Image (cartoon, rainbow, N blue to C red):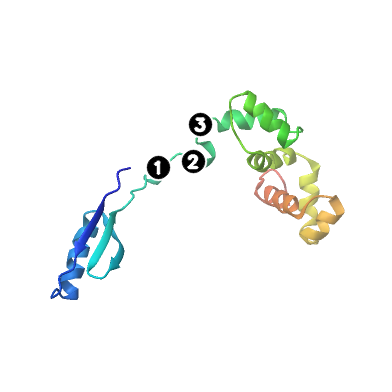
Amino acid sequence: MNVQNLVLEIGENESAADVQTRLNKAAGDGFFLVNVVGRLAFLRTTVMQKKPEERRPLSNVDGKEDVALSIIRDHVEDSCTKLEQRLAEAGIKRSVNWIGKKRLPMRAEGTKLVESVAAMTPVMSSTAVAATTGLSRSAVNKMRNIALTDKTLSH
């Protein structure tokens, strides 16, 4: 993007209202005030962002999220590192962290573990459930959220 700079000289006898009017006009032309040093006002063009509907989702920048999720779903029991390698072989670059976040709900879908965590959490803290099940508190909270949003579970 082409960024332009503008320097306005503030006259010695210029009133604050006149300066404000000039700066507002510049702002209306797409500039914003960066700094004022002595009698110089430094402005720069504003960086316009795309409208939300024009932006691609950050997680699907390359448009391959559906393929990546299907590979993860097909090999859900593999480690995150192994899944990262499988995705790389398919020409899809995703971090181990991204893979782990997408894989956890897939591993829990339709399992008794989600139902048992959901059954325990109303009466036990997530720390107690984690100690009982051997899961991390984060995993317990994620499974609790899955169970709460899953319409097939009856509670």
How far is the residue under mark 1 from the one under mark 2? 10 Å
Q: Residue at x 61, y 24 (%)?
A: 90
Amino acid, disc 2: Pro
Mark 1 is surrounded, within 10 Å at the Cα level, by few (under 14), some (14 to 19) or many (20 or more) other residues, namely few
Above or below, comparing residue 38 to residue 58 in the picture: below
The amino acid type found where label 3 is placed reads: Gly
**Quadrant containing the N terminus in the rendered view:** top left
In this image, 95 relative to 62: left or right? right
C-alpha gap between disc 3 and disc 2: 9 Å
Comparing labels 1 and 3, the label whose residue is closer to the camera? 3
Label 1 sits on residue: 53
Percent position (x, y) of residue 36? 28, 67
Residue at 81% from the left image edge and 54% from the top image edge: 130
Q: Tell me the element at label 2.
A: loop
| Residue 57: mark in rendering | 2
Viewer-side label of 1, 2? 2
Give the secondary structure at mark 3.
loop
Q: Residues within 10 Å of mark 3 (few under 14, many from 20)?
A: few
Give the distance between the C-alpha atoms of the residues marked 1 and 3, in whole angstroms. 15 Å
- For mark 3, what is the residue? 63
Instruction: Name which quarter of the figure residue 105 lies in.
Output: top right
Q: Residue at x 51, y 32 (%)?
A: 62
Q: Position of residue 148 (x, y in %)?
A: 68, 51
Say if mark 1 contacts mark 2, CB within 8 Å.
no
Which label's residue is closer to the chain start, 3 or 2?
Answer: 2
